Amino acid sequence: MSGSGSHLQVAQGASGHAGAGLARRGIASVIDAQVRRFVGAASLIAAKFISSKPLRRGDHHKLGDAGEAYAAKWLRGQGYTILRRNAHTPTGEIDILARAPDKRTIVVVEVKTREPIAGRPRPERQVDPAKLVKLATMLAHLTKANGWHDRPRRIDVIGIDWPAGGEPELRHHVGVFVAKTHSPKAR
């Protein structure tokens, strides 16, 4: 992205991007299995924090933006480096692009925030197999554009229940999708 001072390549070329045809190569079934594991995962990390500003009911976009900012701050506190927020690719936008605390793993983070209502599923349940295929396609594009083939890469999902005027509850689902790492070919 021009003017950012970063060498990170995000929106390079609208056609011929890496990951085209992922669904045709069977990735959808792999992701579907990982989604089932994700939805039933017992290994989610839950945390409660005090809200700095109460949010008004019915303000969907502001709530989503606040959730993404909150998630980025939480991730920083966990040792992640935020590479970019709202990173644009030819196939869509990534909420948060980060580097994990191990300083090698590239993480695409999808953030879903909503006000909790009795009987309604948690916000992270909105990340269905089609959304994971789209996120995997965006990760593949970034991998090619930035030469990350030899780095570990994954997709995480953060769900936030944020009651009006209350404390947000964050759940971090790590490794909902893990990309294959390719080592450089020996010559």
Image: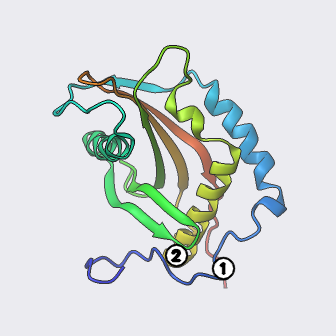
33 relative to 9, above or below: above
- Element at badge 2? loop
Q: What amino acid type is highlighted by mark number 2?
A: Gly
Q: Is residue 83 left or right of residue 185?
A: left
Of all residues, the one furthest to the top in this rendering is 118
Q: Residue at x 67, y 37 (%)?
A: 35
Q: Position of residue 103 (x, y in %)?
A: 37, 56
Q: What amino acid type is highlighted by mark number 1?
A: Ala
Q: Position of residue 96 (x, y in %)?
A: 40, 54
Q: Position of residue 67 (x, y in %)?
A: 34, 40
148 relative to 113, above or below: below
Q: Quadrant of the N terminus?
A: bottom left
171 relative to 22, above or below: above
Instruction: Give the residue at mark 2.
Output: 147
The residues bearing labels 1 and 2 have C-alpha atoms spaced at a distance of 16 Å
Q: Residue at x 68, y 54 (%)?
A: 133
| Nearer to me, 4 or 150 | 4
- Element at badge 1? loop
Q: Earlier in the sequence, mark 1 or mark 2?
A: 2
User: Which image quadrant for residue 167?
Assistant: top left
Residue 60, numbered label: none
Q: Residues within 10 Å of mark 1 (few under 14, many from 20)?
A: few
Instruction: Give the residue at mark 1.
Output: 186
Q: Residues within 10 Å of mark 2 (few under 14, many from 20)?
A: few
Mark closer to the observer (1, 2): 2
